[in-house]
Image: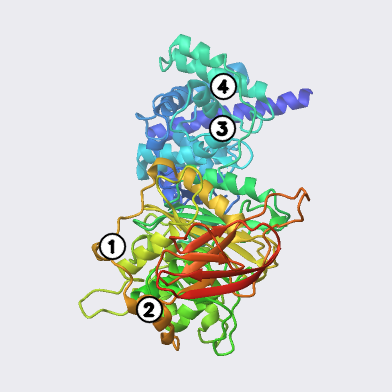
Amino acid sequence: MRLRLRQDWREYRRWAIAAGFGAVVLAAGGALKVSHDFNALPPPPQIGDLSLSVVVLDRDDRLLRAFTSSDDKWRLPVELEEIDPLYFKMLLAFEDRRFFDHGGIDVRALVRSALQSVRAGRIVSGGSTLTMQVARLLDEAPTRTFRRKYEQFLKAVQLERSLSKQDILRLYALRAPFGGNLEGIRAASLTWFGKEPGRLTPAEVALLIALPQSPEARRPDRFPDNARAARNRVLARAASAGVLTREDAMSAAAEPVRARRHSMPFLAPHESREARLTGPPLKPVHRLTIDADLQAALEKLSRQKIGSYPKPVSMAILVADHRNGEILASVGAPDLLDNARQGHVDMTRAFRSPGSTLKPFIYGLAFEEGIGLPESYIDDRPTDIGGYKPTNFDQAYQGTVTLREALQLSLNTPAVQLLEAVGPARLMARLKRAGVRPVLEKGAAPGLAIGLGGLGLTLRDLTQLYASLARQGEPVSLSVCRAECDRDSIPYMGPDTGLGQTADVLSRKSAWLVSDILSGLPQARGTEASHIAYKTGTAYGYRDAWAVGYDGRYVVSVWLGRPDGTPVPGETGAGAAVPVLFEIFQKLGPGRRPLPEAPPEVLQAANREVPAPLRYARLPGRHEAARFADALRISYPPDGAELDLGLGAPGSGEPQAQPLVVKLKGGAGPFSVLINGTPLDEKARRHQLVWHPDAPGFLNVTILDANGESAGITVFLR
């Protein structure tokens, strides 16, 4: 014990001698040895030389995600103006009252500290300036020996000569230790208080000043009593210095110390990771167009929705403002750290089959090429085009329908017929005009299968494609970068028109007609006043479920499936993705805008009948169908069809049967209807008959129009 006291006394005496000697020598100045040692020092580090954490910020400079520095520290970049001014007032009052007056060493404080320590036999006050503490932090070495303390004096003077006072304060704010791998006031404020250091209470400021003096022994999560005592000493000093009133200091001292450690923000993890990996290697701050509030809401929504699906089913969401191309939210997976759902895979960038989501562009090209109009007829029947035999998703056929109905019902055979008319190569060219990069099998030429999902696109591609629809055919490049970043999706704008302008994805009229059709699909409650144009898609074998929609401002896309491409039986775009799509639009709230009004060329033709040559879509080898467009016929149900209307035996107690719906095309009304040869009392005045059969069995339906023409079918009802 006596030996230990002797050793401690030697340490105190050695420190006091060093302090006194350093103060005298450096105060005298001009000594040859000091001058030689000073000139032998390496250049002081600059702020730009520090290893800082890479941070990713949202559109309002709010922290989305931070990464540890190269030496595994949470050392977040921060500017002085981003820190509460009270922090520096209390810091200087506690650590270095004459900071702005000395040149790195406060001789008065050193001499006073040395004398006090010699008299007391222990260190009463440190006497080191804030600049000396910065020199020690930058050196990352202990200063218990005479030589090390002497070097610290020299380096403090060197810092004062090469840096401004503001730079020294910033270095302290970046390097002060706060326990564990926390360095700097920003990391400490986020960890111990869960907020940025821009607005702090006196109690919070005092704790941030007290922690660096003994960061491990005063950690609030491990030693809250030590932290409270040290904090209150800072508050008392601030009150005696006049920085705080006695009342404010007492009130702050009564506050409990929060012992909970907050996690660093972890929003948009996939986009943040991408920004870090693709940005300049030494860039510490990346600024994105992401909206932190919206991003947090959609990540929470995706986790809620995916919870009802078995692992490894995942979900991805993208929201963009198509007016300027800014991506506002990007959810690559519900949880980056969920290995069971392969959360590390960013499904906004994964190439998948888009299913039926490209059909609107096929119809848009057909409108643009004069192949048809929304009210033109087309047959939905079994089709064989050069050996390619597409079938509808439900394996059923609707007979003769309008192009509007065919797109809204997402029928496959009409889409393939139209794609044959416009040409797969032309569709691919239009997709590239939007700036997307479709992927085909190596060496394969685009065929009719691309209209039903026979190529690879990403969720970003689809979002950018539909953004062009929302802009009435004008392409836009979506980007997540606010400034100084490489845009990797600059759109290919197509060949020059010869007028010094580049071509659009679709003509304005065609794009509006497609939007008008898509906005006529069923709307969720709460969206009727501002309709959403949207389209669904389901890849072959239920591997991918899609929904993409837009209004006058936003374009939203949703994907659901398994990252490994394994089917998710029964999950379709309409059933799985559309409900999520509408919930997202509801969260977008008052910022939404209605779809644009019809362009003049559409308004001029709105009240006109479909021209005779376009009563039927002008398809290859099917021009003869137009000659029969005016003839009376029954388009649905097909002749010989079996229809399950739920007609049970009398008194069986089964639910009420469904009506028989008969659709007519051509002819002149009103129409007389005969059921099994017996005329109905009332004539049909529309091209649709709704009739309730009495019993199951065979049924003969005959229709007579005002000109005496007739059409009939025989169906079997069950």
Q: Callout 4: 10 Å neighbours few (<14), some, many (20+)?
A: many
**Looking at the image, do the residues carrying marks 4 and 2 touch, with CB atoms under 8 Å apart?**
no
Disc 3 secondary structure class: helix
**Looking at the image, do the residues carrying marks 3 and 2 touch, with CB atoms under 8 Å apart?**
no
Cα separation, mark 4 vs mark 2, equals 79 Å
Q: In the rendered image, which residue does mark 1 sit on? A: 607
Q: Would residue 154 be seen by someone viewing this image from the given angle? A: no
Residue 159 percent coordinates (x, y): 41, 42
Q: In the rendered image, which residue does mark 4 sit on? A: 231
Q: In the rendered image, which residue does mark 3 sit on? A: 212
Q: Nearer the viewer, mark 1 or mark 2?
A: 1
Disc 1 secondary structure class: loop
| Amino acid marked by disc 2 | Ile
Question: Which is nearer the N-term, disc 4 or disc 2?
Answer: 4
Question: Which is nearer the N-term, disc 1 or disc 2?
Answer: 2
Residue 669 percent coordinates (x, y): 41, 65
Residue 175 percent coordinates (x, y): 51, 41
